[in-house]
Amino acid sequence: PDTGKILAMVSLPGFDPNTISQDWDYLVSSENSPLLNRAAQGLYPPGSTFKILTTLAYIRENPDTYQNFSFDCQGVVTIGDVSITCYGGQMHGQETLEEAFMRSCNGAFATIGTELKYSPYKEICQDFFFNDSIDFAMDTAKSSFALQENSSVGDQMTTAIGQGDTLATPLQMALIASAVANGGTIMKPYYLDHISTYDGDLVKQYKSSAYRTVMSSDEAAVLAQFMTRTGVEGTAAALSGNGYTVAGKTGSAEYDLDDSGDSLGTHSWFVGYSNVEDPDIAVAVIVENGGSGSSTAVPLAKTVFDAYYYGY
């Protein structure tokens, strides 16, 4: 988070670069699109990981009163003719903003979405690369924040929980986690440390550089607190007690399996970082149609953190 170095980038299914010519017909015709770098070019609804930005928008609008936020979750919230349910129909009861965040309460955040001022909310999302390109040496897809000034209440509710027409790349979500870890500043991502000749002479050394400051250190500290609690007793609690600390946010993002709109799948998300007092690495994991973030993405994030700290 404090350098922007890309230590690992994985896209599955993959392919063998040594046999591209032999495998070409399969590679270009496969519906699994193995040539697509999903990490930087895959566009997915971010689901509840987007609540990081909705939370930032709320505390920025209510810097003196956000701690007084209170919501009574009954498992579903209905505003007008639109109903939003919490994942699995869970009833969270009375909760603060921090508790709504760590439990990933859709009802609380859908309600917040109807109260946020449009322009500041949009500007925050654009600062975090929504509707904007990321300056990166690999091709990246442009994400989508589609909410408009005159959007319906339903669109406001679904946008606030990372659904609707909201789309993001895993790289972008890793940068959002990095911004929290790095006190509000995103470092420019890069994946080459240096270039040298075959006998070791240095040709070029790449260096870290600040990319964007997207929030104040105080705002980042609040989000870090919420994400840390999520990694201890919230939806990412499986990452606690492993010899390192983790701050994060899970997501379970619904999407249409076909054109009917009736058949839904769920992408499994986790974004976060480790060693919360002095962050080491930021991670974004998405498993296509993997179910809930807690059940699938969190265990995979654990394998990444374990590999970094323990070599397995």
Image (cartoon, rainbow, N blue to C red):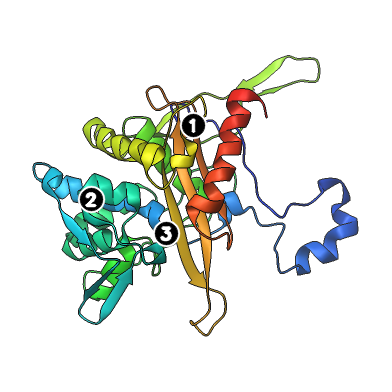
* Residue 4 numbered mark, or none: 1
Q: Earlier in the sequence, mark 3 or mark 2?
A: 3
Q: Whole-Å distance between the Cαs marked 3 and 2?
A: 16 Å
Quarter of the image with the C terminus is top right
Mark 3 vs mark 2, foreground winner is 3
The answer to whether the residue labelled 2 contacts the one labelled 1, judged by CB atoms less than 8 Å apart, is: no
**Residue 261 drawn at (x, y percent):** 48, 81
Residue at 52% x, 65% y: name it: 266
Residue type highlighted by circle 1: Gly
Total residue callouts = 3
Mark 3 vs mark 1, foreground winner is 3
Residue at 82% x, 65% y: name it: 26
Q: Which residue is mark 2?
A: 57
**Residue 3 drawn at (x, y percent):** 47, 27
Residue type highlighted by circle 2: Ala
- SS for callout 3: helix
Q: Earlier in the sequence, mark 2 or mark 1?
A: 1
Relative height, residue 232 to residue 270 (above, below): above
* Residue 47 numbered mark, or none: 3
